[in-house]
Image: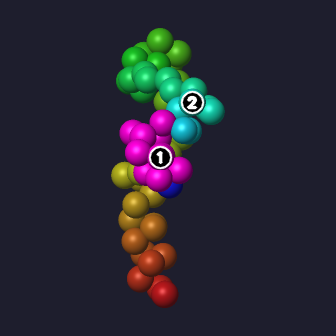
């Protein structure tokens, strides 16, 4: 919101305060060998089912 009020590009304040790193997660995984325990594709059906219960 502050960025919009000041006429700056979106996220500029957060980038200035917190830093801005760009990386490709596939490159990080290739170098480190890390694999996620769960993927969105794995949990999406349960999320949809939980939403239907409401």
Q: Earlier in the sequence, mark 2 or mark 1?
A: 1
Taking the spot 47% from the left edge, 41% from the top edge, the residue there is 11
Of residues 8 and 39, the one drawn nearer to the viewer in this rendering: 8
Is 39 situated above or below 25?
below
For the residues carrying marks 2 and 1, which lies nearer the camera in this image? 1
Residue range of the region highlighted in magenta in the rendering: 2-12
Q: Is residue 9 above or below residue 5?
A: above
Disc 2 and disc 1: Cα gap in Å?
A: 14 Å
Image position, residue 25 (x, y; %) = 42, 26
Q: Which mark is residue 16?
A: 2
**Circle on res. 27:** none
- The picture quadrant where one finds residue 52 is bottom left
x 45%, y 67%: residue: 46
Image color mode? rainbow
| Residue 53 picture location, percent across and down | 47, 85
Where residue 42 sits in the image (x, y, percent)?
42, 53
Looking at the rendered structure, the number of numbered marks drawn on it comes to 2
Residue 4: percent from left, percent from top: 43, 51
Q: Residues within 10 Å of mark 1 (few under 14, many from 20)?
A: few
Q: Secondary structure at mark 2?
A: helix
- Asked whether residue 10 appears in the rendered view, the answer is no
Along the line of sight, the residue nearer the viewer: 3 or 26: 3
For residue 44, what is the image quadrant?
bottom left
- The answer to whether residue 45 of the structure is visible from this angle is yes
> Which residue is depicted at the point 39% across and 39% down?
9
Between 26 and 21, the residue placed more toward the observer is 21
Q: Is residue 14 magenta?
A: no
Say if the magenta span includes residue 11.
yes
Between residues 38 and 10, which one lies in front from this camera angle? 10
Q: Which residue is mark 1?
A: 6
Question: Residue 36, relative to residue 39: is it above or below?
Answer: above
Mark 2 neighbour class, 10 Å CA radius: few under 14, some 14 to 19, many 20 or more = few
């Amino acid at each position: 919101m502050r960025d919009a009020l000041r006429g700056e590009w979106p996220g500029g304040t957060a980038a200035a305060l917190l830093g801005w790193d760009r990386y490709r997660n596939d490159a990080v995984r290739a170098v480190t060998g890390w694999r996620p325990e769960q993927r969105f594709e794995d949990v999406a059906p349960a999320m949809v089912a939980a939403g239907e219960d409401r």
